[in-house]
Image (tube, helix red, strand yellow):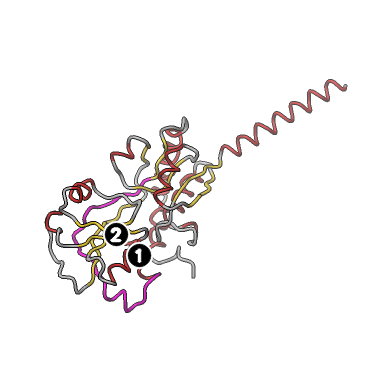
Amino acid sequence: MIVTAMKLFTALLLLISFFSYAEEDKLLKITTGEYPPWSSADFKHGGFVHHVISEAFKHEGFKVEYTYYPWARNYKQGQKGDFHATAFWYHSEEREKLFYYSNPLYAEDVVFFHLKTTKFKEWDTLENLGQYRIGITRGYTYTPEIWEAQKKGNLNIVVSNSDKINFKMLLRKRTDLFIMATVAGYSLLQKELSMTHMQTLTYNPKPLFSSEGHLLFPKVRPDAQDLLKVFNKGLKALKNNGFYEKYYDLLLEGYYELP
């Protein structure tokens, strides 16, 4: 009887251990950064992008936990493989060597913001912009053409540590142009600047490039491709059942920003 009881007890422990491991294995850890209104620890659901990521994985039976870092560190953390994925990034050849890209989370135009008093109406190539001081944000993704033009001395690039600093640089006339995505740019302006300051700024309607944000899965992890397939399946389901469009409407209405 004692032997039988011990066997039953051992089997029960193994069963509990199995389910505990399975439940733990369903928790995904993702490294990310602040980029309102798409992502922010201070927003509902962490912002639109994190809401979409969480719901896509939830549809497939997974939970998500986010850890926020400055963008440059976010990228380094993502490479190590300690996290299941890193959110969220534009495409680049460098990253493609290290990560598997999810299907797009969203699309947005990246433009040149400037003061309304700055004479900047038309441009064809980056070579036309040599006379301007152009602000960019450390750790962000920009086109290879921008870096090549800077390397050749055709562009005057000014690197700052945040988008907020870059907008202040514009207002103080320490830069002439600032490269920023439209939705994220105006969201930040509404949050951080006065209406008077906002009314002094505009952007050139011609996009520098159109961006798509992706969830990246580090190739050093053996489960990366499996999780990529899981996420893409969940994302497709969100779009098919109309929830993705609903979340995007909430984004435009300002729903994610806490009062």
Q: Which of 83 and 80 is in front in this view?
A: 80
Q: Do the residues labelled 2 and 1 touch (CB within 8 Å)?
A: no
Q: Residue furthest bottom?
A: 196
Q: Quadrant of the N terminus?
A: top right
Specify the amino acid type for callout 1. Ile
Depth order, front residue of 210/112: 112
Residue 166 occupies quadrant: bottom left
Q: Residue at 65% across / 31% down in the picture? A: 18
Q: Position of residue 64 (x, y in %)?
A: 52, 46
Q: In this view, does 220 lie above or below 121?
A: above
Please check the rendered image and state whether residue 22 is part of the magenta-colored stretch, yes or no.
Answer: no
Quarter of the figure with residue 86: top left
**Amino acid type for the residue under numbered disc 2:** Met
Which stretch did the figure color magenta? Answer: 192-214
Q: Which residue lies furthest to the right in this view?
A: 1
- Return the x and y of residue 57 as percentages of the image width and height: 48, 44
Image x and y of residue 95, in percent: 33, 40
Instruction: Residue under label 1, please give it.
Output: 165
Q: Earlier in the sequence, mark 2 or mark 1?
A: 1
The residue carrying pointer 2 sits among few (fewer than 14), some (14 to 19) or many (20 or more) residues within 10 Å by Cα, namely many
Name the mark nearer the viewer: 2 or 1: 1
27 above or below 252? above
Q: How crowded is mark 1: few (under 14 residues within 10 Å), some or many (20 or more)?
A: some
Give the numbered dot on residue 180: 2
Tell me: residue 82, above or below residue 33: above
Q: Distance between the residues labelled 2 and 1?
A: 12 Å
Is 1 on the left or on the right of 240, as rendered?
right
